[in-house]
Amino acid sequence: MEVKVLKDILGANEQIAERNRQLLGSNNVFAVNLMSSPGAGKTSLILATIKRLKGKTKIGVIEGDVSSSLDAEMVGKEGVPVVQINTGGACHLDANMISNALGNMPLQDIELLLIENVGNLICPASFALGEHRKVIISSVPEGDDKPFKYPLMFHIADVVLINKTDLSPYLKFDTEAFSQAIKRINAKIEIFQISCATGQGIQQWVSWLLTQMSFLRGTKRIF
Amino acid sequence: MHELAITKSMLDLVLEQAERAGAKEVVKINLVIGEMTGVVEECVQFYFDFLGQGTIAEGAALSFKMVPVTARCQGCGKLFEIKEFDWTCPYCQSNNMEIISGKELFVESIEVE
C-alpha cells in the first residue's frame, strides 16, 4: 500500500525554529545567525560588534562549536551573557539546540542575539534556527571562488561580510568578481567589506544591524 | 555530514506516518531532493542502513528523485536549468533570476505492508 506523505524532511526543525522566532520576537530580541568557514572571523566579528555597541545595545551571544568552550570564555570576558553549545560532532546548529540555549539566556535583558554557527559553509544553510537575519562571513584568504562552490549558503544569506580586507595587498582576491558571483546567486544580498583587525567597515556593519533591529521593533515581524 | 541529521528527521517522519497508517513494515521510501540542497544519496543510504536497524523501516528501499536547479529569468521571463552553477540566463545574459526548483527536501510517499 502506498501512503502519500508530501512532508518536508526538515519540517520538524522549521516548526521549532518558528517557535524560537516567536519567543525572540515577544521579548523584542533581534537574532542573527552568523555562518562561515572555520577561521573566517565569526568570533572576531562578535567581539568587534560588542565593543562597538557597548553601552548602546544589550547583546547576548550563543556560541556553537563541535567541542570546547574557548569562544564562550573569550566572549564572556566582554561582560555579555553567553551560552556555549557543543554539538558533539554535528556540523551545524539546529533549532532544537537553540531552543534549549534560549532557556539559559536572559531574554528580557538583551536586545540583540548573535548566534555563532559551527564553522562550515554547507550544513548550516539547511537548518533554520529562528533567526531574523542570516549573515555569512567570507574572508579574503579563503579565495574568491566560494560562491560557486557553496551556492546554497550564499543564496539564503541576507548579508555577506568580506573580512580580513587588511590582507588584500598580499593575496589574490578579486572583490569585484566575488561580489558579482554572489549577486548572481542572490540579487538582494548586501555586501560589506570589513576588517576585524583594523576596524575598517565595522561601523557600516553595525549601522546595518541597528537598522534591521529597528525594523523588528517597528513591525514585530521580519522575514 | 548534514545527511546524518537529515536522515534522522526523514526516518522519524516515515515512522510517524507508517504508524498512523497502521503499517507493519515499510518497504519503500520515495524521496524528492533538490540538487541545491547538496544532499548526497550515498550518504543518506549509509546513515539509513544504520539508523533504520530495529525499526519497521529496516531494510526499506530508498528511492531518490533528484530535482535539478531551475530558474525563471526576471529579465526575459524564460525558464532554464542552472548547470554547473552558472547563474546567468542563457537567453538574455541577465543575472537576475528567481529559483523555481532545486531546494526540495521531502518525503513524497512510503510503501507499507
Image: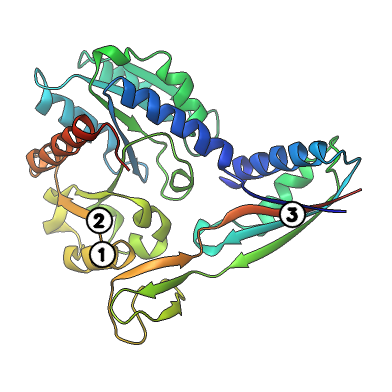
Q: Chain of mark 1?
A: A
Marks 1 and 3: CB-CB under 8 Å? no
Disc 3 marks a residue whose amino acid type is Ser
For label 2, the residue is A189
Q: Check if mark 3 and mark 2 are on a common chain.
A: no
Total marks in image = 3
Three-letter amino acid code of the residue under disc 1: Lys
Label 3 marks a residue whose chain is B
| Callout 2 crowding tier (Cα within 10 Å): few <14, some 14–19, many ≥20 | some
- Residue position marked by numbered label 1 in the rendering: A183
Whole-angstrom CA distance, mark 3 to mark 2, is 36 Å
Helix, strand or loop for disc 1: helix
Q: Disc 2 and disc 1: Cα gap in Å?
A: 7 Å
Residue at 9% x, 43% y: name it: A204
Q: Is residue B92 left or right of residue B57?
A: left
Asked if residue A96 lies left or right of residue A171, the reply is right
Image location of residue B27, percent across then percent down: 87, 51
